[in-house]
């Protein structure tokens, strides 16, 4: 009986072990599935919160949750899904951060799916994602870095993808929606443009917000149609006094024309001679659609851009031209002007538009004297300029730097200090408020703008702008502290400013001081303070030039013995 009891006990123990293993499998899978759902919930909250999207930590937190799905069961059915979503989030993060490490991380996630899960449904998605991530082809690191070699499977879609890549620009329609605009009929009231041989900006003005779509059509010789880009504005009418046709006739575009395409839709067509790339985006208060077109650099255009607006060539002995200095032309933009007074000062009768014009004039003179650079002012008198016009001036003048001068303001009159901005997603609430004020729009519109910024800034000089801002900010605070007390360094910040949008050179916006603060306002209207402030900005620009063009800087300093350098 004792032997039978032991035999029975061992049998039961073995059965329990087998059952525990069998039961563990579904619970194991269930746990991976639950982790995936938790990660997906994290991503859903992030996707619907523009505020959360501003912070890198929120993106990395969701990515970590998706990667935990793979780590839980590397060979399970949810592993490929976890990898794919990790790659997708890294890709979206790259479009905001512009960090190559984020782009590489997305690529690595997709490659792992192709290599480890060749039979998974996510393999095809990963291949398509890599094509979108590298529209010109994956850069070669080694001869074995091609995706098809890693997967050991030849994709039947490769030839089709090549054709899509070749002609996609001619068949893409992009739609931009404006919430709450349905049912309202707006009026298209004007067309404007600025141009040089390698860049053209066209602006469509409207009296209210409206949804729109745009499409680029390839040339059709059979019906004698050139390359053309059209923008359709929904629920719109053509204004009675609008100039329907504007000849452009530069190296890129022939003309722009507007017409009532249907009873409730206006179509604006831009006829294209040649182009390299283009961007279309909208601004608000008032609503307008901006079309930026860039051309390829040719010998002809390189010769043409050396001429100024009057047609005269830069003097052959000009110092910057002799030394091929990286910075030879600077555009200074005094903010506001005309009917736009800017922020009111603490002192009665003092307004931002007048103070920044005084600062800009002093700064322009000092840059010419000390740095021997050509200076162009967006405005040299009290006149109104739209924000998109200021950037267009810098682009069409082929500026090497763009510096927009402003004064800060706050409801709390105790607020004071200096801060410098460059174009990017806003990093804090204060930056959003400053951008909303300078853009003459609402904080809600800033959130809407941040959604499209990732696409707009692909060619922006973000890193260079950040470096320029850092040098200028540091010099302003350091130099002014030698003569003044209570100089507060509010730091270098980033925010979506309309006036910096589309700038093709390093571009910064300086908030020189708080005009709403008693002490700062009194200093801002003081000529000595203005002089010292401008000297400090010049020193910051000088440090940037030294860092980016050290050889040319030393040659210029030694050959000409300029007192403005090295001081």
Image (cartoon, helix red, strand yellow):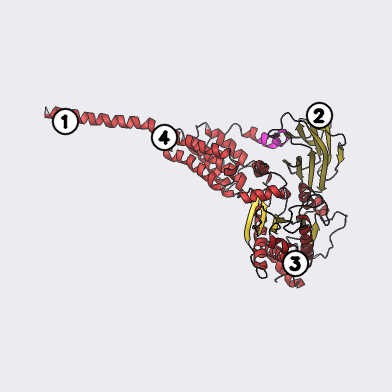
Which residue in the structure is indicated by mark 1? 6
**Depth order, front residue of 417/39:** 417
Q: Position of residue 53 (x, y in %)?
A: 58, 43
User: Circle 4 — which element?
Assistant: helix
Q: Residues within 10 Å of mark 2 (few under 14, many from 20)?
A: some
User: Which of marks 1 and 4 precedes in the sequence?
Assistant: 1
Q: Which disc number belongs to residue 31?
A: 4
- Give the extent of the magenta segment: 162-178
Using the image, determine if residue 514 lies above or below residue 255.
Answer: below
* Alpha carbon distance from label 2 to label 4: 56 Å
Considering the image in quadrants, where does the N terminus appear?
A: top left
Q: Any magenta on residue 172? A: yes
Residue at 69 percent across and 54 percent down: it is 409
Toward the left, the furthest residue is 1
Q: Position of residue 277 (x, y in %)?
A: 73, 43
Q: Mark 2 and 1 residues: CB-CB less than 8 Å, in contact?
A: no
Using the image, determine if residue 313 lies above or below residue 89.
Answer: below
Q: Which disc number belongs to residue 531?
A: 3
């Amino acid at each position: 009986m004792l032997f039978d009891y032991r035999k029975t006990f061992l049998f039961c123990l073995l059965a329990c072990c087998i059952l525990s293993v069998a039961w563990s499998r579904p619970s194991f899978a269930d746990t991976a599935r639950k982790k995936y759902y938790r990660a997906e919930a994290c991503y859903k909250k992030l996707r619907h919160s523009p505020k959360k999207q501003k912070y890198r930590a929120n993106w990395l937190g969701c990515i970590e949750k998706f990667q935990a799905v793979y780590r839980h069961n590397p060979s399970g059915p949810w592993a490929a899904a976890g990898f794919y979503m990790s790659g997708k989030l890294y890709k979206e993060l790259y479009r905001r951060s512009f960090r190559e490490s984020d782009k590489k991380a997305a690529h690595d996630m997709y490659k792992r799916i192709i290599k480890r899960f060749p039979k998974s449904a996510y393999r095809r998605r990963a291949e398509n994602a890599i094509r979108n991530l590298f529209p010109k082809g994956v850069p070669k690191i080694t001869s074995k870095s091609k995706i098809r070699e890693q997967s050991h499977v030849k994709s039947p879609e490769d030839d089709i993808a090549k054709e899509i890549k070749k002609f996609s620009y001619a068949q893409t329609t992009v739609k931009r929606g404006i919430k709450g605009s349905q049912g309202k009929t707006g009026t298209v009231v004007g067309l404007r443009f600025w141009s040089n041989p390698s860049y053209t900006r066209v602006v469509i003005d409207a009296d209210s917000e409206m949804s729109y779509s745009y499409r680029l059509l390839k040339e059709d010789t059979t019906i004698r149609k050139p390359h053309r880009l059209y923008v359709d504005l929904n629920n719109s009418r053509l204004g009675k006094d609008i100039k329907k046709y504007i000849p452009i006739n530069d190296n890129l575009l022939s003309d722009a024309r507007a017409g009532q395409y249907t009873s409730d839709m206006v179509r604006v067509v831009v006829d294209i001679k040649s182009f390299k790339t283009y961007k279309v985006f909208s601004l608000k208060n008032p609503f307008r659609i901006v079309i930026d077109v860039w051309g390829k650099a040719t010998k002809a255009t390189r010769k043409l851009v050396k001429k100024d607006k009057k047609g005269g060539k830069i003097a052959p002995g000009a110092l910057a031209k002799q030394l091929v200095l990286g910075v030879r032309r600077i555009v200074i933009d005094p903010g506001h002007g005309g009917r736009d007074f800017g922020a009111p000062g603490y002192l009665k009768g003092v307004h931002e538009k007048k103070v920044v014009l005084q600062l800009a004039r002093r700064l322009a003179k000092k840059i010419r004297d000390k740095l021997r650079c050509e200076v162009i002012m967006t405005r040299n008198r009290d006149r109104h300029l739209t924000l998109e016009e200021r950037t267009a001036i810098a682009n069409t003048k082929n500026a090497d730097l763009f510096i927009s001068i402003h004064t800060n303001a706050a409801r709390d009159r105790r607020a004071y200090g200096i801060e410098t901005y460059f174009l990017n997603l806003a990093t804090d609430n204060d930056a959003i408020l400053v951008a909303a004020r300078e853009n003459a729009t609402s904080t809600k519109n800033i959130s809407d703008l941040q959604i499209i910024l990732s696409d707009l800034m692909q060619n922006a000089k973000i890193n260079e702008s950040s470096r320029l801002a850092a040098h200028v900010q540091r010099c302003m605070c350091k130099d002014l502290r030698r003569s003044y007390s209570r100089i507060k360094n509010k730091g270098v910040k980033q925010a979506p400013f309309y006036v910096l949008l589309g700038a093709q050179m390093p571009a910064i916006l300086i908030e020189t001081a708080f005009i709403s603060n008693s002490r700062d306002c009194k200093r801002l209207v003081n000529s000595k303070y203005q002089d010292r402030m401008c000297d400090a900005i010049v020193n910051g620009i000088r440090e940037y030039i030294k860092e980016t063009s050290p050889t040319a800087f030393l040659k210029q300093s030694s050959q000409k013995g300029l007192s403005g350098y090295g001081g």
